């Protein structure tokens, strides 16, 4: 498999050997408690676990480079937007106000900085786990996992197809990009920003059209095979739970209980170091 392509990588690690269902449940439960809790001590513990899981999955940087860059850009823009539209939200949450610098409406306080630090850690917690889940889980097994936890199989199969064709879309993008550069459109880093934007825009239309053509072919093939006729279906990639799967679920429950314990100790979802 091309390591520059984001998608399922059938490596041989204990993470790959877990069933898609146990990984999906773990991802959902850990993400929920990490989003609920604003205790930096708890989220840092989960961050260490998330980093360990990511290291164990043996995912190569080339596989996730583009995705990580996009997530980092989105996270930074989100943090800046939170500060611009609600610079006093941290002081409101923690009940105190310690000014770092005063710039009129955009006054930065220690409370606001601490609040946004919590938001940043939440991104760091969930991103590695989500990447591990997506890259170590076969799309067909993922759809079986969704169906096993109660999601209708039609929707499960649609999600599976979307994940399965992510590498194809990336390959189409690269092919169209090379073709447009051969026609004289500047897309490389050496070009000016406006030229690169114009060159990239010339890629989007053929990429969308080729994707729509693939969607039409797939939908027609599924209709010819009477997909969706029955209320339920069997799954070729469905696997039974192993010992490690049960341990994974037990770990997810333990993390939930620890998160709830921190919330009870703090008296709320927020750890307040400014009291």
Image (cartoon, rainbow, N blue to C red):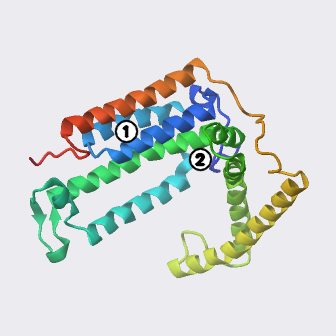
Of 119 and 270, which appears nearest the observer?
Answer: 270
Q: Is residue 58 visible?
A: no
Q: Residue 266's image quarter?
A: top left
Q: Is residue 141 visible?
A: yes
Residue at horizontal 14%, vertical 45%? Answer: 273
Q: Secondary structure at mark 1?
A: helix
Q: At which x and y percent is residue 6?
A: 62, 50
Residue at horizontal 73%, vertical 64%? Answer: 175
Q: Residue 57's image quarter?
A: top right
Q: Is residue 257 left or right of residue 19?
A: left
Q: At which x and y percent is residue 168?
A: 73, 55
**In the depicted structure, whether residue 211 falls above or below residue 35:** below
Residue at horizontal 65%, vertical 36%? Answer: 148
Disc 1 versus disc 2: distance between alpha carbons? 21 Å
**In the depicted structure, whether residue 141 falls above or below residue 38:** above
Of 260 and 139, which appears nearest the observer?
Answer: 260
Residue picked out by circle 2: 63
Residue at horizontal 76%, vertical 67%? Answer: 212
Do tag 1 and tag 2 residues touch (Cβ < 8 Å)?
no
Quadrant containing the N terminus in the rendered view: top right
> Is the residue marked by circle 2 packed among few (<14), some (14-19), or many (20+) residues within 10 Å?
some
**In the depicted structure, whether residue 29 falls above or below residue 209:** above
Q: Nearer the viewer, mark 1 or mark 2?
A: 1
Q: At which x and y percent is residue 8?
A: 66, 43
Q: Earlier in the sequence, mark 1 or mark 2?
A: 1
Q: Which mark is residue 91?
A: none
Q: Is residue 67 left or right of residue 215?
A: left
Residue picked out by circle 1: 47
> Is the residue marked by circle 1 packed among few (<14), some (14-19), or many (20+) residues within 10 Å?
many
Q: Secondary structure at mark 2?
A: helix
Q: Residue 165's image quarter?
A: bottom right
Seen as rendered, the residue at the extreme top is 243
């Amino acid at each position: 498999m091309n390591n520059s392509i984001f998608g399922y990588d059938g490596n041989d690690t204990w993470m790959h050997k877990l069933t898609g269902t146990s990984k999906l449940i773990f991802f959902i439960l850990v993400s929920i408690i990490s989003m609920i809790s604003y205790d930096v001590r708890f989220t840092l513990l989960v961050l260490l676990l998330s980093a360990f899981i990511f290291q164990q999955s043996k995912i190569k940087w080339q596989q996730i480079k583009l995705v990580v860059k996009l997530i980092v850009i989105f996270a930074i823009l989100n943090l800046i937007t939170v500060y611009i539209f609600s610079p006093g939200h941290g002081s409101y949450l923690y009940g105190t106000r310690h000014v770092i610098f005063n710039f009129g409406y955009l006054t930065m306080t220690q409370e606001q900085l601490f609040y946004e630090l919590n938001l940043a850690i939440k991104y760091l917690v969930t991103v590695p786990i989500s990447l591990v889940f997506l890259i170590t889980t076969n799309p067909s097994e993922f759809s079986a996992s969704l169906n096993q936890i109660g999601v209708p199989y039609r929707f499960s199969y649609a999600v599976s197809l979307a994940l399965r064709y992510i590498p194809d879309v990336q390959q189409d993008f690269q092919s169209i990009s090379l073709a447009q550069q051969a026609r004289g459109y500047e897309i490389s880093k050496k070009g000016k920003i406006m030229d690169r934007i114009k060159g990239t825009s010339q890629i989007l239309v053929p990429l969308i059209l080729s994707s729509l053509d693939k969607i039409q072919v797939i939908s027609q093939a599924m209709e010819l095979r009477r997909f969706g006729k029955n209320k339920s279906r069997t799954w070729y990639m469905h696997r039974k739970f192993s010992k490690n799967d049960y341990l994974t679920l037990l770990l997810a429950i333990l993390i939930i209980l620890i998160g709830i314990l921190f919330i009870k100790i703090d008296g709320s979802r927020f750890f307040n170091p400014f009291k």
